[in-house]
């Protein structure tokens, strides 16, 4: 590594760390004041609040890295431009691309780091944070899922449940429709007994061809071998894809497809896991290009531009996701279209950047 590259990285590192801390504190304060009255009303102790804030740090870090990187790179390069420090660099024949190559490599490494950090740290800590906060605020941590249904193509049945109660491993309002044979099974509730669902107060309705109508038979406890989904499978319907790791999310999408349920939204969120990590590299590329755009009020202008670009990207991503989840574009296109557009924009701006 050349000395000029080392100087660039050292100048960037301090600004990046300070900016990162600033945005983490900002996000922490937003979350704190959003729940402040709940903490006061429920007499939550200082240690409990502090523990909740500690659990929220990894998620704040994940949110803050792209914005902090965008600001720190543009501010560092902008300061160098305004102080005429790059005259010797460019006058010596070094191009802007070669000069900022360490920053681009850092962006690639940070993108990979953010992906693995999300998968191995953020998902677990944000789950602990939500559960701990729910207990502190006396809110139920396990949410009941309403109106669950799926199709079992192998058994050729349709299963519908009014609700699933996670902490009791309990189903309510269970109805099983046989699509080929004229048979319906209904039960008020069902509980998991480690191997199968036991339906309580169960009624089995079967077509009697002789009598010409359905005949009902009541069974106190019926072992529903027809329902092959375990509580863990049903539990996944309570969670969002962004709250699952890659393996669990892929399994859940396969479950949706096999059950004949819509999976486009889940696929879009799945691809967003990968596109989110790439945003770090994209903001690095854009920051390199706008670093020399300002000659005065560099800190203020870089901050405003960083926030502005972040908002534009976020809105673009929301629109793209909405198009994908409503079937107008494929899920992979909805997740990666903003990345592609901003990548092209970044390359164009770098080629037009002042040297």
Image (spheres, rainbow, N blue to C red):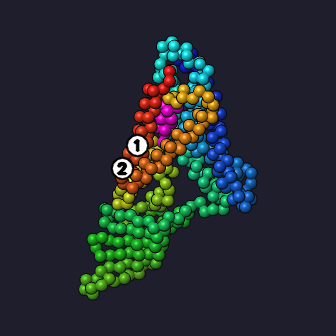
Q: Residue at x 47, y 57 (%)?
A: 236
First along the sequence among labels 2 and 1 = 2
Q: Residue at x 41, y 65 (%)?
A: 149
Label drawn at residue 329: 2
User: Considering depth in this image, is 78 or 119 the residue closer to the camera?
Assistant: 78
Magenta region: which residues? 276-287
Q: Is residue 273 magenta?
A: no
Contact? badges 2 and 1 (CB < 8 Å): yes
The x, y position of residue 21, in whole percent, is: 65, 37
Q: Tell which residue pokes out farthest to the top in this image.
A: 92
Up-down relation of residue 218 to residue 63 (above or below): below
Q: Tell which residue pokes out farthest to the front in this image.
A: 296
Q: Residue at x 63, y 35 (%)?
A: 300
Q: Residue at x 63, y 62 (%)?
A: 139
Q: Which residue is mark 1?
A: 337
Q: Quadrant of residue 179?
A: bottom left
User: Considering depth in this image, is 341 or 261 the residue closer to the camera?
Assistant: 341
């Amino acid at each position: 590594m050349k000395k000029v590259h080392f100087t660039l990285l050292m100048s960037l590192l301090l600004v990046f760390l300070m900016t990162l801390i600033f945005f983490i504190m900002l996000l922490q304060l937003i979350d704190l004041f959003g729940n402040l009255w709940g903490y006061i009303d429920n007499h939550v102790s200082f240690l409990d609040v502090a523990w909740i804030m500690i659990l929220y740090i990894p998620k704040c870090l994940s949110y803050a890295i792209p914005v902090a990187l965008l600001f720190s790179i543009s501010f560092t390069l902008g300061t160098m431009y305004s102080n005429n420090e790059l005259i010797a660099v460019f006058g010596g024949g070094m191009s802007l691309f070669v000069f900022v190559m360490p920053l681009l490599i850092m962006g690639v490494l940070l993108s990979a780091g953010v992906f693995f950090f999300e998968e191995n740290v953020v998902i677990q800590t944000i789950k602990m944070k939500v559960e701990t906060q729910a207990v502190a605020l006396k809110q139920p941590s396990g949410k009941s899922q309403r109106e669950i249904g799926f199709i079992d193509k192998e058994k050729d049945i349709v299963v519908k449940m009014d609700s699933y109660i996670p902490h009791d491993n309990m189903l309510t309002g269970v109805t099983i429709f046989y699509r080929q044979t004229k048979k319906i099974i209904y039960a008020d509730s069902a509980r998991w007994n480690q191997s199968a669902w036991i339906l309580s107060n169960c009624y089995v309705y079967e077509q009697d061809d002789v009598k010409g109508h359905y005949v009902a038979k009541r069974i106190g406890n019926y072992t529903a071998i027809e329902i092959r989904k375990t509580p863990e499978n049903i539990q996944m319907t309570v969670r969002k894809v962004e709250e699952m790791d890659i393996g669990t999310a892929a399994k859940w999408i396969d479950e949706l497809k096999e059950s004949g349920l819509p999976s486009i939204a889940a696929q879009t969120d799945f691809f967003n896991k990968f596109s989110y990590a790439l945003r770090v590299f994209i903001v690095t590329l854009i920051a390199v290009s706008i670093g020399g755009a300002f000659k005065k009020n560099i800190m203020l202008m870089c901050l405003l531009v960083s926030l502005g670009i972040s908002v534009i990207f976020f809105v673009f991503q929301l629109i793209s996701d909405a198009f994908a989840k409503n079937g107008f574009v494929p899920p992979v296109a909805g997740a990666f279209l903003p990345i592609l557009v901003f990548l092209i924009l970044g390359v164009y701006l770098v080629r037009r950047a002042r040297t």
